[in-house]
Image (cartoon, grey):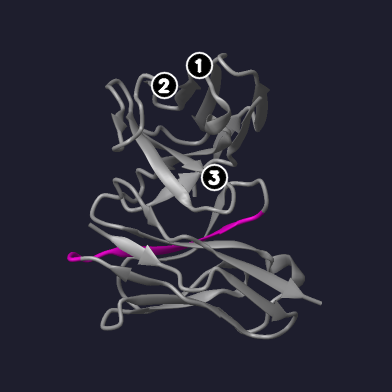
Amino acid sequence: GAVVSQHPSWVICKSGTSVKIECRSLDFQATTMFWYRQFPKQSLMLMATSNEGSKATYEQGVEKDKFLINHASLTLSTLTVTSAHPEDSSFYICSVRWTGSVYEQYFGPGTRLTVT
Amino acid sequence: AQSVTQLDSQVPVFEEAPVELRCNYSSSVSVYLFWYVQYPNQGLQLLLKYLSGSTLVKGINGFEAEFNKSQTSFHLRKPSVHISDTAEYFCAVSVQYGQNFVFGPGTRLSVLP
């Protein structure tokens, strides 16, 4: 399987500020990465699909101007939460699509964002 | 579109007892099925997957699941649970090229001493 890292593992920021979360594929090149959000005691909801070298595809209801995704290299995708509000507090998880099998995804450890 | 149902939001079970976590799905096309485990404040770890072939799939940590196409189910089982199995379990489906997963709402397994 693939090894996926996220940084930071947790972050606290003030309302109105922006925070960047990194997702790295450590042992293979990932053309496609996914960003999920998980609220407490809920399931994962797909926010967007990040494709290397092109614009991300956002799911319905996700504000693309608020959640900026940059997939600048085959091993790194970043999610920037702009002008964060307390309701953006959540657990953000990225995943990479395993190129060895187009049906599989491997998940990062997640980033806990708390907006005060 | 696909959907996943996990009927049990919480399953308490005593240590060394067997457990079954239920998963049903709906889809108009063939699906690939996955079970993931999530420990507190951690990401998801793949337990097992069904892509094709044998309908009985064995995974890590002694878990197994059986794909039943007629009942559109993919229930997860373990014959004897440990305290360390306490976690959230998610069933997920994917179609074709794994563009995205559809996750079930999750089942909280609590193993009691």
Looking at the image, which is closer to me, A80 or B9? B9
* Pointer 2 chain: A
| Secondary structure at numbered mark 1 | loop
Pointer 2 and pointer 3: residues touching (CB < 8 Å)?
Answer: no
Q: Is residue A59 left or right of residue A98?
A: left
Q: CA distance from mark 2 to mark 3?
A: 18 Å
Q: Which residue is mark 3?
A: A39
Q: Residues within 10 Å of mark 1 (few under 14, many from 20)?
A: some
Q: Residues within 10 Å of mark 2 (few under 14, many from 20)?
A: some
| Residue A83 badge | 1
Pointer 2 and pointer 1: residues touching (CB < 8 Å)?
Answer: yes
| Residue A66 badge | 2
Residue at 69% x, 70% y: name it: B110
Above or below — where is B96 with respect to A46?
below
Kind of residue sitting beneath label 1 = Ser
Find the magenta span and give its range.
B28-39
The x, y position of residue A90, in whole percent, is 56, 37
